[in-house]
Structure formats: C-alpha cells, structure tokens
Amino acid sequence: MPLFRKGPYKGGIIVKQKTVREHPMGKIGARLVGHEDYANPGRYIVGLEGAFDASLKGKSGKRLKQKIAKGQWKPVYDENEVEPQDGYDIVSTINVNMQDIAHHALLKQLEIYEADHGCVIVMEVATGEIKAVSNLGKSKNGGYYERLNYAVGESTEPGSTFKTVAMTVALEHQVIDTATVVDTKEGKFRIYGRTISDSRRGGFGKISAARALEVSSNIGFARLIDDAYKNNPEKFTSQVKAWGLGDKIGIPIKGEGAPDIPEKGAVNWSRNALPSIAYGYNLEMTPLQILTFYNAIANNGTMVKPHFIKEIRSWNQKVETFETEVLHEQIASETTINKMQDILKNIVKRGTGKSLYSENFSMAGKTGTARTEYANIVEWNKDRKYVSSFAGYFPADNPKYSCIVVIHKPSTQKGYYGADVTGPVFKRIAQKIFTDSPLKAQVANVDQVDASVQKDYETYYTKVQNAKKKVPNVQGMAGMDAVSLLENFGLKVKIQGNGTVTNQSIPSGETIKKGQTIILTLS
C-alpha cells in the first residue's frame, strides 16, 4: 500500500505499542500474584507484584516526539532514543499443579456449603516454601473469585485448632501429661459464671488429656489449662508469645494480619480469658500463623518461616536467592513433639477427624469450629455463623506438606463442623497431590532434565552462553515457559491457542533482531 511504502515519516502512520496483561492460569492464584492499583495504572500494591515491584518494574525508556496536531504526537526515530530496561524476574515457590488442586478443592466445597469465603495454604514442611495459596470470596452474583488475601490478612478467633498450641504448652511445662484425667461432666460446665458446652450431647465424662484433644472437648481444655495456670496465666501466654505467635511473621506481602494474644491486665482480660483461650476464643490469629505452628510439629519441632519466593533472576543469572529461615530450632522437647504427633494422628484415626481416615494414606491434624460475629448473642442465635477449619500435615509418618483450610460462614442447614466442611478439602488436596498426580516442579529447573519437553532450560541456557543472539527451539515446551524464555532473549511473543508449543514462526538458530516478534502456536 502507498502509505506503507512511504514509511513512518512521509506516510504519517503512527504505531503504538501496547502491553497486554495475560493470566496463563486464568484467575487461579490471581490475588497472590497481585494486581494494579486501579487509581494508578502500572503501580502494583498487593500480592507478590506489590511486594517485589521495585525488582520487577525495570526502567522506562526515552523517545523524542514531535507534536503534529492538537493532542497528537509522532515519534522521532534518532540515535538519542533510549530503550527501556527490563525488570528482574522473580521465581516463586508456587507449584502450579498444587495450586490448581487447592483452588478447585476449595471452590467445590464453597459451592456445596454456600459459604461466604475461604482459603487454603499448602506449605513444604522442611523448607517453609508455600506451594499453593487459594483465596476465594463470594460475589454478588453468587460466583467465587479471588478478592482478598484471607490466608495472610484475615485474623480471627481460630477455635479448636488452637487447642494443639495449648496442649503443647502444657505438655512442655509438664503441668499435665497425656494420661492426665479431666472430668468433662455431661457436656456442660459452668466456670466463673459462664457455661461452656461440648459438641456431644451428654458429654464425654472423665477422659484423658490426649482424648480431650482427640474429641475436641472445650470443657476438657478449659479445665486443664485453667487448673494449671490460673495462678500464673502469664506463664501460659508468655510461652505462646515466645514461639512468635503473638507477632506478625514478617512476610514481604503487604497486609499481613496482626495476631492478638491477650495478657493479664489487658482490656480484654478477665477471669474467663484463660479458659476461653484454651479452646481458641478470646484471641486472634491468621491462617498462615496457625499453619506455621502445625508445620513446626510436623517438622519435629523446628519452626521455619513461610516464604513465597525462591530467587530473583536477571535472564538466567541469579540476583538473589531466598533460603530457608529457621525461626526456632526447637519449639519443644522431642518427647513433647512426639506426643503431639501421636495425638494429631489419632485425631484422624479415631477423633473428630475420623471421617478423613484412610488405610492407604496417612494424615494428621486438628479440626476447628468457631462461632463468628456473635457480639450480639440474641441476634446470633437467630442466624448462627461459624468458621470451619482443618490444620494438619501429610503423610503423617513422614510429613512432606502441611496444609490449612478455613471456610467462613457455611450454610448451617448443610453443615458447619470442621470435620464436615473443611476436612474433606484437606483430604482431597492431600490425596490428589500424592496419588492422582505426579509431583512436578511448577517451572523446569535449569539444572534438571525434564523428559516431557524436547529441550529443557539447561540446554537452552547453555545455547545462550554460546550464541546469545540465536532464536532457541521452544517446540514441545509449555506455553508459559516458552514465553518466559523467549522474552528473556529479547523477543516479543504472541501466542495462539493453549497448551504446549507445536510451532514457532521464527525457526530456531536464526539471528535475533531488535524488536522482533515471534508467534507461537499452542495445542
């Protein structure tokens, strides 16, 4: 066409380049990844992108422009043009297979129980690497979407999952043993003018402390902890805080919820405070903070800091590596940890989590059911609202992953106990990870050969060192991996379809030209 033949100057054609944001996994994990500040496009304020914006954003380029009409400018191409500099790449700890499993397991249960919102976290026991985080909230149209980071930011009363913490404190202080007998009466017990109830009508009678945790007896824990610490409650709360459970973990993602562990003398302290704390009320923690403690039990007493990023890269060069950070070498003695591990296994075998038990696959953990929004107890009794949870790890005998599931305000007509609402999500995730799908890294490691693709990162990066200006062969690679690799080579990439790369518009081995675009066909 004549206009094109005259070029950008005489033809008058102005070409504008526009960057389009793509989500290869759809909206799965979108809140964790992050999004723009809608009032300030280009500025990322939440998620990993908000936390690492300074590393990701790079530097803007410069180009001389000439005004040709009101509000119209055309670029002047000359030697003074400064190309923009790419930001660094961040390599997350998220495993896309596990993320997909967690997302759909949570979504299914939210829909079944018509719940308001929920979250799931999966953590690698030994390292603290977060392998999956799903946050789903109900919208006005009834669908569930990633809206808020409940896993990190929502601090609420944990309910019975905190009994594990209380039991660990008491065992470590040797004020009780697993065989200590506590009388839970007939399911109701009045203490300091307030009545505590157990979920089982008729109660559990006289049971051991270990059994009290297995059946999640509120009365049992209120009496055990109050009898042991009523004359010195600071000893109990100080131990909880010594493990760091009274402080934020200190993750880079913005908006971490602050825990609240009250102490004697505080505004929210009363004679009933300690018995209430014993079974998970009158204190607040986030799901991530609770999981960090359970992960320590699974890790034989070593508490590690949860982290979301493995490393920061510039092309194939490591700029910064994030290693495992140990918060506490040993939160309790080997004897105490072994006892807690046995009880958590027995909860699944014969306690409140027995519906999860499988002879073929071992799990350990604790159910939780807590009232929520009950400040006006009269109104609450008309429309009861609960938070259901399950925290634990798997496999029980050789823990690889820890996991917490929290679901807020399920329909009470369908069920609200942790064993019924969140337990099945935990079980589905655990079994799916270990039995239905192979364990794969979310992105092929540059030092690891993957037979499922034609060429792996190690091969590609070796080629880069030998011929940095050559187009690599990406056929057979997953689409998202191919895009990442080609962009690191300085190419602009367009994709057609979904899946793995079956064709590339520029053959491998050709010299890369500045600003060149390559089209990938996926199927």
Image (cartoon, rainbow, N blue to C red):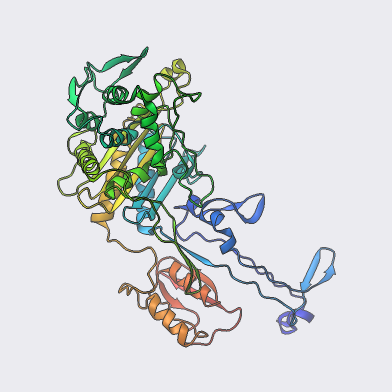
**Relative horizontal placement of residue 56, taking residue 426 as reference (left or right):** right
- Quadrant in the picture for the C terminus: bottom left
Q: Is residue 226 above or below residue 462?
A: above
Residue 513 placed where, x, y %?
A: 58, 84
Residue 280 placed where, x, y %?
A: 36, 30
Residue 336 sits in which quadrant? Answer: top left
In front here: 35 or 269?
269
In front here: 119 or 243?
243
Residue 118 placed where, x, y %?
A: 42, 40
Counting labels gives 0
- Residue furthest to the top: 193
- Quadrant in the picture for the N terminus: bottom right
In front here: 269 or 493?
269
Residue 288 placed where, x, y %?
A: 41, 44
The answer, for residue 143, to whether it is visible in the render is: no
Q: Is residue 60 above or below residue 227?
A: below
The answer, for residue 313, to whether it is visible in the render is: yes
**Relative horizontal placement of residue 10, taking residue 274 as reference (left or right):** right
Residue 184 sits in which quadrant? Answer: top left
Residue at 25% x, 18% y is 187
